[in-house]
Image (spheres, rainbow, N blue to C red):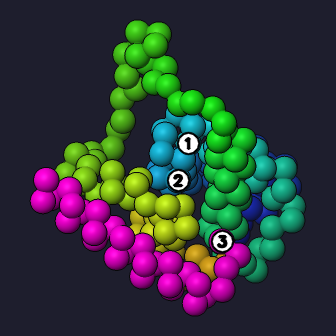
Amino acid sequence: MEHELIQRIKGGDQKAFKQLYEQYADYAIRIATAVTRNQANAKDVVQETFIRVYRNIHSFDNHQSFQPWLYRILLNECNRFLKKNSQTIPIDINEELNLPPEVDHYEFEEYEELYEAIGELEDIHRVPLVLKYLSDFKEREIAQILELNLNTVKSRLFKGRQKLKELLLKVREG
């Protein structure tokens, strides 16, 4: 079905692109939020990602899996965003403008400590962990997405899990 949808998009079918967007947007926002550490920024990154997908869909090889291709673009956009905005000082716009906070439709309260700990990890450990455990990618797919050696991915996952465990123990100990 996914390949048929992509073929329709390549043929100029706008409804097919909307369907593809709706299929992946929420999940992409969750991944981008984990990488950028900000949901508003994540939404901007996802928007740019889908613009790039639309512009470059003709170069997608239908014999490959679509998800790794999409997430490689997503992570490149996250990196581009983070690099571009590394000199800016983050502020909470809702407090500055006295706007009500944005409502998050996900029930993450029970995992709040985990998400905070993941947010404290360095990118080289956080991104592979997010792809593996939040997106269910296999290690080989993560290596493809991040354009890394498979053993490097395995090492980063191992070290990331160790660091995450240490962070969670510190939080629970007080």
Task: Say which mark, if any, is on residue 146.
Answer: 3
Q: Is residue 81 above or below residue 5?
A: above
Q: Position of residue 170 (x, y in %)?
A: 21, 61
| The furthest residue to the top | 98
Label 2 amino acid?
A: Val
Label 3 and label 1: CA atoms lie apart by 18 Å
Label 1 and label 2: CA atoms lie apart by 8 Å
The answer to which image quadrant residue 160 occupies is: bottom left
Left or right, 103 with respect to 125, comes to left
**Residue under numbered circle 2:** 35
Which is nearer the N-term, disc 3 or disc 1? 1
Within 10 angstroms of label 3, few (less than 14), some, or many (20 or more) residues?
Answer: some
Label 1 amino acid?
A: Ala
Residue 65 within the magenta-colored segment of the rendering? no
Q: Is residue 13 above or below residue 62?
A: above
**Residue under numbered circle 1:** 42
